[in-house]
Amino acid sequence: MQAVANEIPVPKKNPLIKPLLIEGEQTYATLTEQISTVVEGKTPRNWYIAFGLSFCITAMLGSMLGYLVLTGIGVWGNNQPVGWAWDITNFVFWIGIGHAGTLISAILFLFRQKWRTSINRAAEAMTLFAVACAAIYPGFHVGRIWFAYWLFPLPYNQGMWPNFRSPLEWDVFAVSTYGTVSLLFWYVGLIPDLATLRDRATTRLRQVIYGVFSLGWRGSNRHWQHYEVAYMILAGISTPLVLSVHTIVSFDFAVSKIPGWHTTIFPPYFVAGAVFSGFAMVMTLMLVARWALNLQHLITMYHLEVMNKIMLVTGSIVGYAYTMEFFMAWYSGNMYEKFTFFNRAFGPYAWAYWTMFTCNVVSPQCFWSKKLRTSIPFMFFISIVINIGMWFERFVIIGTSLHRDFLPSSWGYFRPTFVDILTFAGTFGLFMTLFLLFIRFIPVIALAEVKGVLAGQLHKAQGHSKH
Amino acid sequence: MKPVEQKTEKQYWRSLDQLSDTPEFRNFLHREFPEGASEFTSEVDRRKFLLLMAAGIGMAGLTACRRPIEKIIPAAGRLAEQIVPGAPQHYATTFNFGGQSQGLLVRSNDGRPTKVEGNPNHPASLGGTSGYAQASVLDLYDPDRSKNVTKSKVASKWEDFVAAATPVFAELKGKQGDGLRFLAESNSSPALRELKDYISKTFPQAKWHTYDAISNENALSGAALAFGQPVHVHYAFDKADVILALDADFLGCDVGSTANVKNFAKKRRAGTDIEAKEHGEHGTATHEEKPEEKKEGEAHKTTAEPSAPVNAEKMNRLYVVESNFTVTGAMADHRLRMQSSKIGGFLAALAKKFGLTVGGLDKNADSLNGNPLAEKWIAAIAKDLTANKGKAVVVVGSRQPAHVHALANLINSTVAGDSVKYTRAFDEKFESGIASIKTLVDDANAKKVSTLVILGGNPVYAAPANLKFLDALKAITTKIHLGLYQDETAVECDWHINEAHYLESWGDGRSYDGTASIQQPLVAPLFNGKSALELLAAVSGYPQESGYDIVKNLWLKTLGGEKAWNKSVHDGVIAGTAFPEIKPAVNAGAIGGALENPPTGGVLLAAKDDIEINFVPDASLYDGRFANNAWMQEVPDPLTKLVWDNAALMSRDMAERLGVKNEDEVELTFKGQKLRIPVWILPGHAPNSVSISLGYGRSGLGLFKRAGKGSGGGSNANLLRTSDAQDFAMGVSVVKTGGTYKLASTQDHWSMEGRHLVREATLDDFVKKPEVIKEMVEEAEVFSVYAHPVNYSEGNQWGMAIDLNTCVGCNACVLACQSENNIPIVGKDQVLRGRSMHWIRMDRYFTNVPSTEFAIGGAKPLVFNEDQMQAVQQPMTCQQCENAPCEEVCPVAATVHNEEGLNTMAYNRCVGTRYCSNNCPFKVRRFNYLNWHKDMAETEKMVQNPDVTVRMRGVMEKCTYCVQRIQTVKIQAKVEGHRPIKDGEITPACAQACPADSIIFGNINDPQSRVSKLKKQARDYQLLTELNVKPRTSYLAKLRNVNKELEA
């Protein structure tokens, strides 16, 4: 143990040796204690304040949506020709944020990236909450929400199937599948930890509730074997979904006829963008959680740095995509395409385009510098900048393509109304509300998995000391 | 009673009671149920109760029914007993507008007039209608109409008015009518004339004044000057090869533009004269000449019928010199922008060049001040007019002063031949309206007027500002006003009589050529209004009281009998009433005299750097009479595309010089009067000149309250309009105030961005090489990767062809569509948000405008030359794509194709994702963002077409090719034994209203249909073919018949 502690400074000196994923003198017991007390301890006053605030914003979301349903889509700024504006922008924005969760839990799991364990639980939760926020928009953006169930292939009196040729219909399946699988994956990962909480429960109520949700987990070898296989299978199922959901969301645009939408580059570009924005969001949240819940030794600088590197990579992919769109617009010889892209960069929405470009392409390039990459205030700032940029990316794609398309006679301009703005703000309230509930009632770090990492770390440390 | 004794036969009885026939037994027999079980104890028993209830409900319903009191005759000629409930009827009637009448066929659905169509038999309609006529039906149901007689603004009754008026008019009669005045707008009605004559007999001292805010009096006084008598000058545009229009909006706002457009279009078909084709007249000489010149587009390759080559001689050439940019200017082959006050000089210079010798030409021509462009024009036009002698015509707009008209008459007398016709004026005692109202004001101020009867019009709003009409009005003891609204004039009068709309009252009128027609009501007055005829009859003691009797009695005298009357009412024209043509001789000396002394008052010959102000009729509101008409407020102006407001229109160079941009507020000062008004830049407007359209600034109207926030108003140009500057004047000052005012425009983009949306070529280029149109866009090799589920080669396949060479952009189709398809209005605020709902819109592009600077791949940036500015109009509606992009993206299959090639909308199925609209390359889909029908008044609901669903909020809608009309005809054809549908039997509302016959609809599977033939023309093209959407609507390219001398 002492030896482990002594070795901590070494990685900083020798870049060839990987840094430790769990810092400090940790045993299984201390880990359990630390992570569980977050859930079990007295609810801090700050949590109440944060929750109260978030809840009020969620209530505002509810009233805005109520106003929308009772009055009509006209309370938003959508118009002819901009039939979709903040509604679908926000939908894609939230869905994109969800991507990091599944990526971290599924793909990194399959690639045996052990550093994921400290952040995967929160990232997965974030995925679910982001999908919940996203799902509001396709539901509420339709003119007659009371008939929105017609989008599902249900047998009812009209005797009609939905139109399977419509990418919007594909969205219905893609998003609902994604939501379901993400929930299952998250829940399966939770089971051993819920059992831990059940075992530590001091009140009958907690015992029963955690008991019910831990599905009789006893931690037997047999349980563990089945659990590992199930988790692996779900990771396998989730992996294509990471790619498919945003691919299909991008089909909403790519399959259409509108210049600026009608491009084959969209699927990879959207997926990269989604991962990019998702990691930025995870970063924002984890920095706050790490500070608020004192988890510095579990979410270490190494984790943060790795995430920053991923943002650097995906941000560069996105930048490449932006550039390539311009190249294709020029190379294709299609005058409408050319116009659309020049209009993006120099037209009435140029401010939005350059906001996007600066935030998404320029700002992550700072992470080439190790100093900036490891500066917590800086990465917090950049993670927020990236999320702003990624929101603008969706707005630029949707808004600027629609506002000036084929016939100049129909050109228009979109301005959001207060309902647009408050609804979007409200989804953040919903997101935060759900996240606060999550950190209050569910272990924010995957206990069982972190212990697995610790086991490896301990084993390694013992091995080293023997030699 | 001893019944037992009466028995004669063998008796059977069942009890002793029966045998003895006691009262108890009788009662028992009579009663079905025991006592107390079967009756109410109250006085009304059950049966009686039900009886009363049934009667009560029945009678309550009956109050909604009104018995016809006068016989009206449907135009379809069906007898009353053959009328199918629910099936619409058409009635011929007459729309009096601007002192002339237009014959209409009005559709009535179960007694509600719902849609106006043109009467093909009527010379001022020829089947088409103006936008004004289309929108007039909405006025009938306007909830803000005056609903009762008022006495000093307090509700009263017609009977009370008659009782009060009788002693007044009896007293006046005693005084020979001294002090009695009438003020009316000019009207061609023979019945009104009859009453006027009657009044002048019974009240010999009474005077009749006529004032129109927009009048034709300059033309009449010009004619009086030239011919010694006020004759009507008509232009037969179907016979003219060269037309020079000077400040004349003869295709737009001018009264009678419907017939003008109709005739003008005949000379613009450029070899695609569908009328000739209808009668099977194929193959003129030119057809055989160049059969190899037909190169079809890929789409039409299979049907290798020779496309009709162009007969260049058939196409006219239009020169327009004008200050404001009008639809006529947009149609021009050559347009010269020039201040209105210099146009007289232009004509004088032309007359000089033309070799005319009358006095004063030099003096007038000097006002051109050596404008080199104008000189070039004058030389070219003089040559062209000479070359086309007998087929050339000079048209001068009604805003130009009399002496310019007179000079034009002089020129026409040498060049026009039979393309100008003359008939006598409606009223041979012609008096200028300005002089007339001035006399009235002077007399009133001198206390010479005791009683004034105002018949329609709104003089308090519209009379020249310097006359201070309101002050004069207040000096009159008894003021009686007849009008549709409680308007500015009505509230100042002692009595206001609510007028009956023309669709609820009898009357008559004459068209421009004198053809008379009967104005037949389709519905009894909704608010018991009275017509002008009835009011005059009541106050003058005319033998007949009702409008019906007055009109019928008058015409029976001429027509002879009931049968002829019925025929006249049925046909919508009275045969043989057209005025005979006359050939008046021109008095050159008188014209010279007038030219020597042109009117003063700053109209002409002012300092050359002065800014000119122009008062122009509004394309939507005309003189303000349609200000409360929601359709008219929301139909975009043809050139500025503004809705709900007017603006100070000025050229781009002038705005630059003044340092103002769109929506900047300026203060105009003219003769001490001030007006604040926002600026709107109209490229190609005359330099140093501001145009303001009339009819706005009537902020008290009910419509503005109903139409939501931001709706309303505009600026009242009449505040600056004086009696010596009714049309234009020099010397207005324009000062930027620093404020701004939001204007709603449906299309603020000028350029086509180098895209070939409206394809345009010069006639010469096209004749040389007809493929030039198709070659403008590289035809992509397009193919489908899957078999289309609909077989388009069978049955009826609907298609449309729109001729851009004849379309003037008059908006009649937009309003017809609005009326036919129950299209809601949304208000200014929602238009600003980009949510106007028109299913057919007029796309207006300025050509010779540089593209947006970054439009790489578009046109090269051009120098912005406003002297070369031209505009094009393109009616844009659902293109009914065979590969409709909207259909494939709808997740619930609410928009699908039918077997006749229509892109249909199932409103019931639509959930409102708006994806279809996003994916529509033409952006013709319209979404119900809010419930536009929420605050609709009960009366307004009556104008709705019952054959078209009213769409709820949250639902997408769009043009259907008027599928309800298609279905009606299909059902009819089925009933008549599954007969094939004849070409032309189905006409969508836009095509029916179009005065230019630019829109042709039909079956493209029938090679003999007009639309098929048009689609085979070399001029035919589809929009955005590279998208492979295969639109069913195609356009025929625009041609400009360019004079080479004015090129370069």
Image (spheres, rainbow, N blue to C red):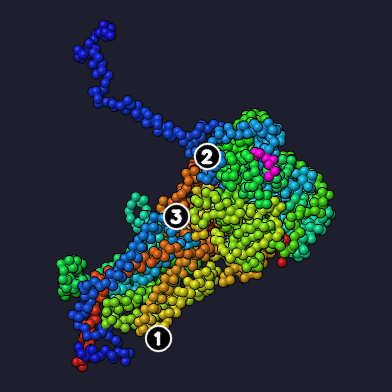
Asked if the residues shown at circle 3 and circle 1 are in contact, with their CB atoms under 8 angstroms apart, the answer is no
For badge 2, the amino acid type reads: Ala
State the image coordinates of residue B1048 (x, y, percent, origin top left): 71, 66
Dot 2: what SS? strand
State the image coordinates of residue B788 (x, y, percent, origin top left): 46, 57
Q: Write down the residue under mark 2.
A: B155
Foreground of the two, A334 or B815: B815
For badge 1, the amino acid type reads: Ser
Dot 1: what SS? loop
- Chain letter of disc 3 in the image: B
Residue B451 lies within the magenta run: yes
Q: Write down the residue under mark 3.
A: B930
Q: Write down the residue under mark 1.
A: A369
Q: What is the distance, in whole Å, between disc 3 and disc 1 at their CAs?
A: 53 Å
Residue B952 vertical placement versus B111 (above, below): below
* Tag count: 3
State the image coordinates of residue B18 (x, y, percent, origin top left): 22, 13
